[in-house]
Image (cartoon, rainbow, N blue to C red):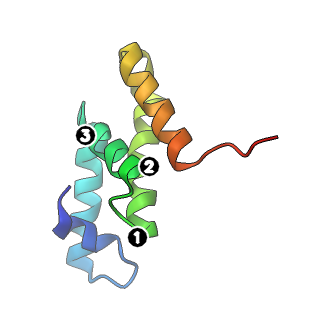
Amino acid sequence: MDEQALLGLNPNADAPYRQRALAYFEQLKESQDAWEVCADALAKGIYSDAHVKFFCFQVLEHQIKFRHAGLSAAQQQLIRETLMKVHPVPAA
């Protein structure tokens, strides 16, 4: 991940940093495999900042909404496992 661009996700960031973050976000959404970087970061707990986590979830959401059918079964399973690991369903 572009650490400099991630600085722009902070609500107190200056306008140039925010612009860079938005451009990076759009780049990741349009990339065919960048969602895997976000899934890995979420699954491994690499980032503790809530803004970065939200950013990663948005990239995954975009992948699910617009490219899910084109993913392999293994990639679809990776997304499911990532979401369950990061946000587990409470036991009944």
Q: Amino acid at mark 2?
A: Gln
Instruction: Looking at the image, tell me whether mark 2 or mark 1 is earlier in sequence order.
Output: 1
Instruction: Looking at the image, tell me whether mark 1 or mark 3 is earlier in sequence order.
Output: 3
Task: Give the Cα separation between the discs numbered 2 and 1.
Answer: 15 Å
In screen coordinates, is 62 left or right of 5? Answer: right
Task: Give the labeled residue for mark 3.
Answer: 34
Q: Amino acid at mark 3?
A: Ala
Quadrant where the N terminus is found in the figure: bottom left
Q: In the rendered image of this protein, does residue 44 appear above or below residue 92? A: below
Which residue appears at 28% of the width and 49% of the height? Answer: 26
Q: Residue furthest right?
A: 92
- SS of the residue under disc 3: helix
Residue 91 lies in what quarter of the image? top right
Q: Amino acid at mark 1?
A: Asp
- Between 92 and 18, the one lying in front of the other is 92
Q: Residue furthest front?
A: 91
Number of residue marks: 3
